[in-house]
Image (spheres, grey):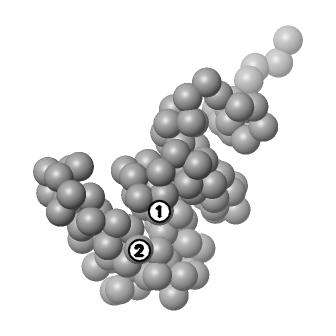
Amino acid sequence: AGSTTARELLNHAAESASTQSMESPHARVKLLVMLGYLYMQVHELSRALKMAELALQTAATIDPEGLDMAESLGIYGVALDYSYRTDEAETVARQRLALLERLAQAGKIEQVPISAEMGMGDILLS
């Protein structure tokens, strides 16, 4: 019997998350965001973008103005930036920052995370 590699496990998890509906859309967003970051770690940017896009689609069904959408925009912006699509990454980062500011003003989050502001700065500097 052959051994299973970490990448094979990642691909299997991504396939499952992409094709199977989960009981909780919120849990699906969390999983897709995590898989997107993992794909970036192994330099599979097209797969990272796919996970981010699926997270965005799922988050939009929950609440287009919610925290799941902000998290999905975060991974999408980073994946775009890593893919040298900086103009698109900047647009997405600005959308995320604006959404987080609205969430903070509405009292849904305590404050805009410093990571969102730093991420915006990273994109502008790239």
Q: Between residues 62 and 39, which one lies in front from this camera angle?
A: 62
What type is the residue that disc 1 sits on? Leu
Percent across and percent down for residue 1 are 85, 12
- Which residue is disc 1 drawn over? 73
Q: Characterize the local packing of mark 1: few (<14), some (14-19) or many (20 or more) Cα atoms within 10 angstroms.
A: many
Percent across and percent down for residue 20 are 75, 31
Percent across and percent down for residue 81 are 50, 74
> In this picture, is 49 found above or below 3?
below
Q: Characterize the local packing of mark 2: few (<14), some (14-19) or many (20 or more) Cα atoms within 10 angstroms.
A: some
Q: Please give left or right for residue 11 compared with residue 76 in the image.
A: right
Q: Please give left or right for residue 80 compared with residue 2 in the image.
A: left
Check residue 95 in the rendering and tell me which mark sits there, or answer none: 2
Residue 12 in view: no
Question: Of all residues shown, which one is farthest toward the left?
Answer: 110
Check residue 124 in the rendering and tell me which mark sits there, or answer none: none
> In this picture, is 82 found above or below 49?
below
- Quarter of the image that includes the C terminus: bottom left
Q: Residue at x 63, y 54 (%)?
A: 57
* Residues under numbered marks 1 and 2 in contact, where contact means CB atoms less than 8 Å apart: yes
Badge 2 element = helix
Question: Of all residues shown, which one is farthest toward the top?
Answer: 1
Q: Please give left or right for residue 33 compared with residue 70 in the image.
A: right
What type is the residue that disc 2 sits on? Gln
Earlier along the polypeptide chain: callout 1 or callout 2? 1
Q: Between residues 82 and 53, which one lies in front from this camera angle?
A: 53
Badge 1 element = helix
Percent across and percent down for residue 24 are 55, 29
Q: Residue at x 24, y 67 (%)?
A: 101
Label tally:
2
